[in-house]
Image: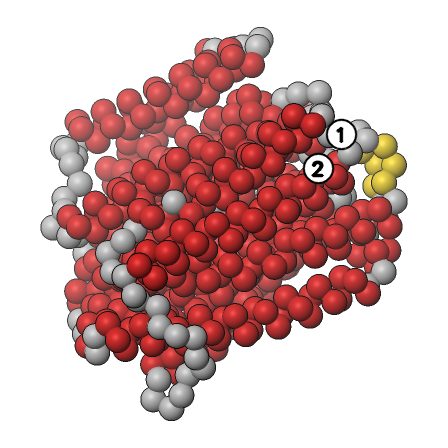
Amino acid sequence: MPSSTIRAAAGISLVTLVSRVLGLVRDVLMIRTLGFSWATGTFALAWMVPNLLRRLFGEGAISASFVPIYARTVKREGPDAARRLLGSITALLLLVLGGLTAAVLLSCWWVPAEWVGKASVDSSGDVSAHQQGRLLLDLTIILFPYAIPICLAAIFAGALNTHGSFALPAAAPVVLNVFWIAALALVWALALRDPTLVVSLVAMFLLAGGLAQMALSLVPLLRHRRVGPLHFPQSGDPARQVLRNMAPTVVGMSLVQLSTILDQTLALYLIDPNAPSFLYTANRLLLFPHALTSLSLATAVFPRFAELGGDGDLAGLRRHLDKACRHTLRVAVPATLGMMLVAPGLIETMFAGERTTAHDLDTAAHTTMCMVASLPAIGVAQLHARALYALGEYRFAAVVSFWLLCINAVLDFALVLGLGFGAPGLALATTVASWLHAAVLRRRVHRSGAQGEPWDLGKTVLATVVMGVAVWGVLQLTGAQSRLGTLTLRVALPMACGVFCYGGVLWLLGVRHVKMR
């Protein structure tokens, strides 16, 4: 793999590490302020919708369709054509997302709160269906417009990545986390205790943070005159090709996102209004290692995939894909096992307090363990999906996503209603679907006929097993009576031991460094 790609991935990882650390800080403050309560669960559900649109339109369908065509336009037709393409895509996004936002806001004004709410009882007392539903609708009114700037930010980030700028777009989540933490700091400074007021204030800060994220990617493009005037695509405009490629991708990726909506909805209505907060916390803890092990490399290699796919170099694309998968799994596999082993101590250290119970912490830990088990599969699936997009295979994702949605739904009902697993069952269903997704995409790429490179995972697996035994042994020999003791003896010490053992075994097996070429 070219060293430039590795350097880009390392730069993204560094910036993303800062973002994830701030994300953990904000999540700790959020749970310490509200606990795993109905307000936290309702906020998680309302916050999920604009984030899903970001993944679907910004980082998903349009980005997957836009980046390969934008990269080819820059290379073959020059900066003027690329400028016009970016301007037309921006105009289309504003039209579609603006209309969708207006429709959602009008619906929230007219839908009775009792239709979407569910009564519950938690540490704050009885909560009526009207109260829970009203908060959900109010938060949706505040948060849904966030989808517009954040989707535009994702498109602008894709353009910057194509021009070799990775660190600045990767810093956008840092900006959002700063706004989020600032909101919670204001809550503590004002001594606010009303949970509905707290989450509403946080939502308003997040909307402002979305505008700041968009500006972070837009300003460099404007400074270098890479954004053309806003206009709708005419005949022969490359934006038409983006739209044609986007249609099946939207269908496929929307089905994937529907599985997330299904999980959160089942958590609310089949379990209780607190349950979405467990899934939200587990997903946040999953994103921390994912950003460092998979997302950064997938982001860095996508422009290269697009270039190789556009040139018809299938063999070169397959070689780059297999190298990227090997590097991803070398980090993701041990990270998964280590995260699962230290999850109980990590959850206790971060979230134990007067607003959380032992049952809350236990449920959060088991949900996190089930969710984190999907980490290697998510990384492999993202890389293979980007390879298929680079090859123009957009329709295949729709078929795969439909069947995965069906499988995920069956597993959700079986594990929650049939076996009573609760929130951990929903996380487990997601993990199973993720592994199936990776396997199907891998098989599709393999059938292309291009010769790939072996992943050589034997040494990685052996080192991971040794690491797991060492971490488990440390956990059995240590105990703690305080928060600092738990952090030291049940999180930091096992993790340090695991890193030392994993690296040591790889060194003994002759793995000295990552080969760049």
Q: In this view, does 395 lie above or below 452?
A: below
Q: Nearer the viewer, residue 144 or 490?
A: 144
Of residues 188 and 351, which is closer to you in this image? 188
**Residue position marked by numbered label 2 in the rendering:** 198
Q: Which amino acid does label 1 sit on?
A: Arg
Q: Do the residues labelled 2 and 1 touch (CB within 8 Å)?
A: yes
Which residue is painted at 59% across and 69% down in the image? 98
Instruction: Residue under label 1, please give it.
Output: 193
Identified at 77% across, 48% down, the residue is 135
Image quadrant in which you'd find residue 29: top right
Residue 105 visible in the snapshot: yes
Crowdedness near tag 2: few (<14), some (14–19) or many (≥20) residues, C-alpha within 10 Å: many
| Residue 354 occupies quadrant | top right
Q: How far apart are marks 2 and 1 (CA)?
A: 7 Å
Residue 327 horizontal/vertical position (percent): 26, 45
Residue at image position (41%, 63%) is: 155
The amino acid at mark 2 is Val
Q: Earlier in the sequence, mark 2 or mark 1?
A: 1
* Residue 387 position within the rendered picture, expressed as x and y whole percent measured from the top left: 31, 64
> In percent of the image, x 76 and y 43: which residue is there?
272
